[in-house]
Image (cartoon, helix red, strand yellow):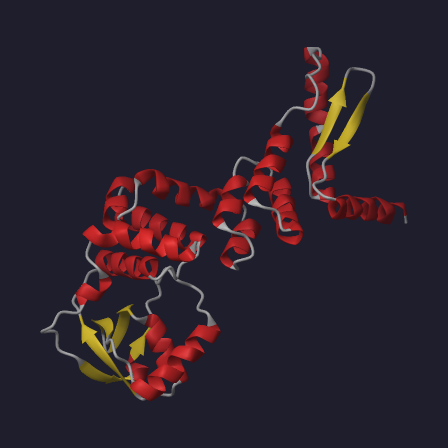
């Protein structure tokens, strides 16, 4: 699957400027002190696999840095445009100097190259990719169509990636850590209640749900369980004022959806759960409230 994705991404990017093409045959390569080089603070990629860096550093110790790091001048320092992974591995290899090629690029060009480089290598997780695309839109005023063209992606694919930013912070962190795939996370987007979304995501991780299972659970959650009861305007107004806070409090306590259903004289409280472990968790909360 990963190989297929890489081939597909390579095909998509075939018609745009490849990061490797930023290094021309006549570009002058300089040797600069490693302490003069610094990472780009706007680098889309926020996490680096330590094991992979160690392997690269061992290769660098033996063979040196084969492909120079692309940088731009910033005062008396050099900010990395492309090649931060090589830079980090060089630090681990305890190099005192690194080869660089200096480019005079503006902020937008640097952002584009950083994003393309990481996409080509599949280094970004889905949330990092979405955040980088959003940054191109907000900070540089690019439209989705313009970014899609630059990245060699279809506009619907770009829009689907951006939708992941609507997830709760906790769910986005699960994606960033690799515990939850983009496909699983995307299936959770219809769940508007943040407590339920988080509970479904954590259960998905612990139970090993497939994407299809997540979609099934979300569909079940969104499907009305009973026909709505017609209440008088007076009762509806009273419930809106007096019961909304109760439902919100119950939702916070149980970290799942809580519903009140009934008529003017009687009803029931419904608490959703998504697995046996989730039911046990709710039971333990109820037991703790008795003490």
Q: Quadrant of residue 88?
A: bottom left
Residue 51 lies left or right of residue 77; in this view the side is: right
The tally of labels here is 0
Residue 62 lies left or right of residue 262; in this view the side is: left
* Image location (x, y in percent) of residue 163: 43, 41
Residue 76 lies left or right of residue 128; in this view the side is: left
* Image location (x, y in percent) of residue 239: 72, 22
- In depth, the one of 9 and 266 nearer the eye is 9
Q: Is 39 located above or below residue 281 in the figure?
A: below
* Image location (x, y in percent) of residue 234: 71, 13
Q: Is 147 located above or below residue 121 in the figure?
A: above
Residue at position x 68%, y 17% from top? 228
For the question of whether residue 167 can be seen, the reply is: no
For the question of whether residue 217 can be seen, the reply is: yes
- In depth, the one of 45 and 242 nearer the eye is 45
- In depth, the one of 246 and 137 nearer the eye is 137
Residue farthest along the right direction in this orientation: 291
Residue at position x 24%, y 56% from top? 108
Residue at position x 25%, y 60% from top? 113
Residue farthest along the left direction in this orientation: 26
Q: Is 201 located above or below residue 44 in the figure?
A: above
Residue at position x 68%, y 23% from top? 240
* Image location (x, y in percent) of residue 115: 31, 57
Q: Quadrant of residue 17?
A: bottom left
């Amino acid at each position: 699957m990963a190989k297929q994705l890489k081939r597909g991404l390579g095909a998509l990017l075939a018609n745009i400027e490849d990061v490797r093409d930023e290094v021309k045959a006549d570009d002058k390569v300089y040797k600069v002190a490693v302490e003069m080089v610094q990472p780009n603070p706007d680098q889309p990629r926020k996490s680096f696999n330590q094991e992979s860096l160690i392997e690269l550093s061992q290769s660098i110790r033996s063979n040196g840095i084969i492909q120079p790091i692309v940088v731009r001048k910033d005062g008396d320092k050099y900010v990395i445009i492309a090649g931060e992974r090589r830079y980090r591995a060089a630090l681990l290899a305890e190099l005192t100097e690194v080869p660089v090629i200096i480019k005079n690029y503006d902020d937008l060009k640097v952002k584009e190259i950083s994003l393309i480089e990481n996409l080509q290598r599949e280094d970004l997780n889905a949330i990092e990719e979405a955040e980088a695309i959003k940054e191109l839109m907000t900070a540089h005023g690019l439209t989705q169509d313009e970014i899609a063209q630059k990245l060699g992606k279809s506009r619907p694919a770009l829009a689907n990636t951006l939708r992941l930013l609507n997830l709760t912070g906790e769910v986005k962190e699960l994606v960033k850590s690799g515990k939850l795939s983009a496909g699983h996370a995307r299936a959770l987007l219809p769940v508007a209640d943040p407590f339920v979304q988080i509970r479904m995501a954590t259960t998905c991780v612990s139970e090993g749900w497939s994407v299809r299972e997540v979609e099934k659970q979300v569909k079940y959650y969104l499907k009305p369980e009973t026909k709505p009861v017609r209440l008088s305007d007076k009762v509806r107004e009273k419930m809106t004022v007096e019961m909304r806070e109760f439902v919100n409090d119950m939702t916070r306590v149980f970290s799942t959806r809580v519903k009140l259903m009934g008529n003017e004289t009687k009803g029931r409280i419904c608490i959703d759960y998504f697995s046996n472990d989730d039911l046990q968790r709710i039971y333990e909360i109820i037991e703790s409230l008795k003490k």
